[in-house]
Amino acid sequence: MPAVMAKTIVVGGFGPGIATAMAQKFGAEGFTIALVGRSEERLADGVKTLGEKGITATAFPADLGSPAAVKALVGKVRDKLGPISVLHWNAYSNAASDLLVADVAAVHATLDVAVTGLLTAVQEALPDLRQQKGAVLVTNGGLLFNDPNIDERAAAWNLMGLALGNAAKHKLVGMLSKKLKADGVYIGEVIVTGTVKGSAFDKGNGTLEAGKVAQKFWELYSARNEVSAQV
C-alpha cells in the first residue's frame, strides 16, 4: 500500500507564544509543520527546537501582509510538503497604533495582515482545504469587541490599529465559516482575552499559558461545531 502522507499545517506568523505552542500541539498529533514568518533566524530556531521534540518542520520566510508573497508561499508549501490541511493565522500588525496620526500606508499595512493576507491565503489554499476537508484556525484578540470600555483601552494603549484589524478579522471569520460550511471546510477563531506568557505583549505580567490556547484550537478543530471561543 502507498504511504499515507502526513497532514500539513501552515503556522503563519511564527514566534514565541501561541504559534510555537500550535506547532508543538499539532506536530505531536502527527502533522507536518510549515513555519511562516519574516525572520529567517527565528524560523530556523523554531525548526531546530521542534526537531529536537521529534516534530518535522520546514521554514518558509514570507511577508504575510503581501498578497503576492502569500500566493507564492502557498505554492511553495504545497510543492514541498503536499496539500495544506490546516491554515493557522497568527499574524498581526499594529502599524497604525494611533489612528489620529497614522498615515494611509500604516492603516493599509495593519489591514493587509489582518484581512487581505488571511483572505489571500484562504483563496490560494482553498482547493487543498476542500479536498482535505480542512480548516482555517485564526488567532484573535479581545480588542475586537464592540464595547465602549474596550474602545477606551485601545485608544489609551495606542492599540487602535490592532483593534481595528481584530474586528475586521472577526467579521471575516464569521462570513467564511458560513460560506465554506457546505464544502466541509471548518473556520474558527480563538479570542485571547489575556496576556500570553512569553509573547511579544508579555512584559512580565503574562497569566495565560500558550499551550492552553493551542489546546483550545485543537478542541475547535476536532469538534468543528463552534466558530468562536474565548480563553
Image: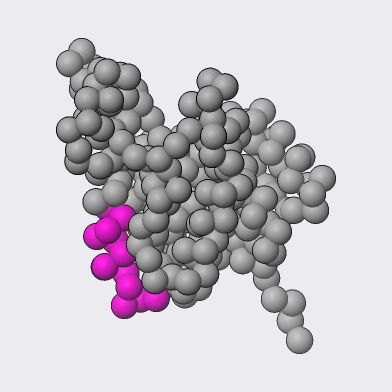
x, y percent for residue 179: 26, 68
Decide if residue 213 is on the left or right side of residue 143: right
Q: Is residue 107 above or below residue 221?
A: above
Quarter of the image holding residue 64? top left
The magenta stretch spans residue 127:
no
- The main secondary structure of the magenta stretch is helix
The magenta stretch spans residue 182:
yes
Which residues make up the magenta segment?
Answer: 172-184
Quarter of the image holding residue 35? top right
Decide if residue 59 is on the left or right side of residue 193: right
Residue shown at 64% from the left, 55% from the top: 25
Whether residue 15 can be seen here: no
Residue shown at 32% from the left, 19% from the top: 157
Whether residue 7 can be seen here: yes
x, y percent for residue 55: 74, 53
x, y percent for residue 133: 46, 74
Q: Is residue 110 above or below residue 23?
A: above
Q: How many marks?
A: 0
Decide if residue 184 is on the left or right side of residue 38: left
Q: Nearer the viewer, residue 13 or 164?
A: 164
x, y percent for residue 24: 67, 50
Residue shown at 70% from the left, 76% from the top: 4
